[in-house]
Amino acid sequence: MADYKLLIHISDRDKWGSVISLVTRMMGDSEGEGFEIIIIADIFAGAVCIACNKSLKQQMIDFVEAGQKIVVCEESIRCLNIPLKSLPEFVQTVPVALHEIIRLQDRGFHYIKI
């Protein structure tokens, strides 16, 4: 069980680089503290999971392979006329981001909107 549960909500596509950099540093500096981190992306931030540069995509993959999650709002992707099947395999989806945010806060996640 994680010592800390963190939910980071990102809607702005330009924030991905700083968010991934922040959580990577935080996990590296934790010295034995367990973090469970979920990044939930909606609106245009969800589309970045499809169309991003190789470096950012690799950082996202590394984040997920370290046991963390990236979750994308299906409703946001549909509103942008993007097929859900075009999302990369390392991304999970939820029908509506707001419902997931409420559910995760109820499970003890600390919410940060970036």
Image (spheres, helix red, strand yellow):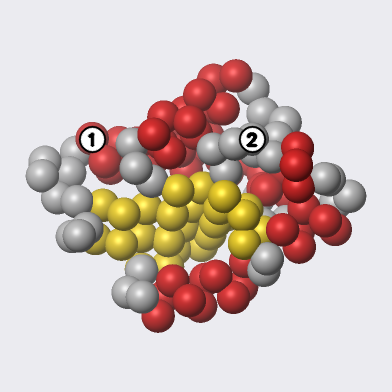
The label nearer to you, 1 versus 2, is 2
**Cα separation between marks 1 and 2:** 25 Å
| Residue at x 75% of width, y 42% of height | 85
Q: Earlier in the sequence, mark 1 or mark 2?
A: 1
Q: Quadrant of residue 100?
A: bottom right
| Residue at x 59% of width, y 75% of height | 99
Locate residue 47, reporting x and y percent.
73, 43
Q: For mark 1, give the secondary structure.
A: helix
Q: Residues within 10 Å of mark 1 (few under 14, many from 20)?
A: few
In the displayed structure, would residue 25 be above or below residue 32?
A: above
| Residue at x 49% of width, y 52% of height | 39
Locate residue 33, reporting x and y percent.
14, 50
In the displayed structure, would residue 26 be above or below residue 5?
A: above
Say left or right for 66 vs 44.
Answer: left
| Residue to which mark 1 is pinned | 28
- Say which quadrant the N terminus sits in: bottom left
The residue under label 1 is which amino acid type? Gly
| Residue to which mark 2 is pinned | 88
